[in-house]
Image: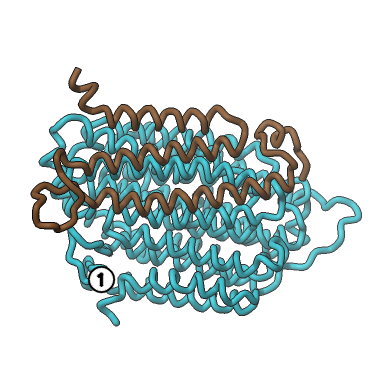
Amino acid sequence: MTEHLPVLPIVLTLIAAPVCLLLRHRLIAFTFALAVVWNAFALAVTLLWTVLDDGTLSYHLGGWAPPWGIEYRVDVLGAFVVALVSGIGAVVLTYAPKSVAREVPEEKHYLFYTAYLLCVTGLMGIAITGDLFNVFVFLEISSLSSYALISLGPQRRSLTAAFRYLVLGTIGATFILIAIGLLYMMTGTLNMADMAERLPQVAGKGRTILVAAGFLSVGICLKMALFPLHAWLPNAYAFAPSVVTAFLAATATKVSVYVLVRFIFTIFRRVETYSGSRLALALMVMSLVAIFVCSATAIYQRNIKRMLAWSSLAQIGYMVLGVSFLSVTGLTAGIVHLVNHAVTKGGLFLAMGCIALRLGSVELDDMRGLGRRMPLTMFLWVLGGLSLVGVPVTAGFISKWYLIGAALEKGWWPIAVMILISSLLALVYVWRVVEVAYFKSPKEGAEPLREAPLGMLVPTCLLIGAAIWFGLSTSLTADVARQAAEKLLGASGR
Amino acid sequence: MSDVLGLYNYWIVIFLMMTGFYIVISRGNLIKKVIGLNIFQTSVFLLFISMGKVKGGTAPILTGDAEVYSNPLPSVLILTAIVVGIATTGVALALIVRIRESYGTIEEDEIEEDRGP
């Protein structure tokens, strides 16, 4: 049992998805999916503890030894991301039934839960596998299911949003496939660890490796929606069902950031493809532009779900900025922000789901006086918003603290100043909502609203609570992240 | 000159890739976009398959009389990638059917003009 631990979360959810399809009845399908995802979370947490105690685990699929067979290689970072994905997946699914009942036609519920399980499978698989082609396959599993999930949104514009995501997502995935092909052509292996060993021998021969790194960077940036390759994200998040938005915003783009980290620090660790070329610099410039342009755009959004989507784009910028420093502190900041933002934005979108359920709208104008009409939900929203800004005692503060520390460590104080200024932009867009919700009176004749049902409030509280908890205690986030970063960078001797 | 002719498979790949990419970007018809996407993906399949070919090598089947074999792995990978491509096309076409049902058109500019709920 324990020797199969690395593969169990994936196998469990992958097999459960078609079973869920056969169950058909919406309640049975939901209960089944819920049990599966919580079990996957339990397995993932066990996996994380095992890895923290015993070091990297290697699992040979079908008993075929690497580099010929497919290897599942779980290090601290991988296990951490798997635990994050399954944890968010479990909490969001617990929240789901009432919200899904309102936004998705009843005969499609079992399909919704099937696609959800597949999406969780794909995202966990990306983080766990040690094989390059496997990354592509899991990426497509998660992407295809997320296209289907987004298209289930209540408005018809969700269809065009899903189609747009499909086109851009496929181009991104194909770019990654091209890069994998070029890397295979040069090294003759698909195993990540093996490829890292072999790359230095071929790196000097021509420009193929650099071209591969270029294709890879563009492909991954499309997937994680780094400005200016972000065009698919705002509409996809704004028009998807609330549950899907919360899940994807908290996990999908974060896993793409993980892929970027994996490529830069595992596969390219022995060659100077990133550090020696302008690729890291390009990533840094793009992430800084993303932080400012997307934060500024968020200020002008009337639809609050879309506003949060633009804010997500800015936050992706912070993560990539941390990664692009190519230092232990920078990478730690990137990973910490990955987790902190996942719980914060997940919680915020869940709160938006509560508002959508009771208010029937996510437009700013309709939210007037909401602070009095749904006090608890709005209170949770404000706490999440404060974490977005990076106010002390919230998770966002810890991320920015590390990020600024990393910038100062390199002596790049202008970047530290820019991070501080960009936080003010976040304050502006969060304040707009607070002002409307607390300082404007509701429209006349507005009916009194009830709070969302307990089944939705508790998961929202959990995620927002986590965002506060991670601001108070960093033992689960920053310490693990530092361990992961040191492991990734330590191997390269930089 | 031998660089141009000797690497002709890559020229075909690049030509197909750019053709597909151009169709995806320039056409407003959603079906044509999907076709462009397919051409784009196919070019990558060709890239993989042609890189596995070894000059003078045969199919890697143990018959006893062949000495040089082509690398079968890229072909196997592409088998998977083709399945992924078909799944993507399937999802895309299903989406187009539903877009057509709710908008009554599959032209991008007409969908943009139709700003209903």
Residue A407 appears in the rendering? no
A52 sits left or right of A293 in the view: left
Instruction: Give the residue at x 21% y 30%.
Output: A207
Instruction: Give the residue at x 16% y 37%.
Output: A203
- Which chain hosts label 1? A
Residue A349 appears in the rendering? yes
Quadrant (top left, top right, bottom left, bottom right) of the C terminus of chain A: top left
> Which residue is nearer to you in this view: A284 or A202?
A202
As displayed, is residue A383 above or below residue B9? below
Element on which disc 1 rests: helix
- Which residue in the rendered view is the most extreme toward the top? B1
- Which residue in the rendered view is the most extreme toward the right? A445
> Which residue is nearer to you in this view: A463 or A113?
A113
> Which residue is nearer to you in this view: A345 or A8?
A8
Q: From the top left corner, tell me how far across and down residue B47 is, in percent.
A: 30, 38
Instruction: Give the residue at x 78% y 54%.
Output: A369
B10 sits left or right of A380 in the view: left
Query: Could you classify mark 1 by the number of other residues whose Cα lies within 10 Å: few (under 14), some (14-19), or many (20 or more)?
Result: few
Q: Chain drawn cyan, letter?
A: A
> Where on the picture, by quarter, is residue A75?
bottom left
Q: Chain drawn brown, letter?
A: B
Q: From the top left corner, tell me how far across and down residue A481 is, in percent.
A: 32, 58
Residue designated by label 1: A62
Q: From the top left corner, tell me how far across and down residue B46 is, in percent.
A: 33, 39
A416 sits left or right of A278 in the view: right
User: At label 1, which amino acid type do we have?
Assistant: Gly
Q: From the top left corner, tell me how far across and down residue A187 is, in percent.
A: 17, 45
Instruction: Give the residue at x 35% y 74%.
Output: A8
> Where on the picture, by quarter, is residue A311?
top right
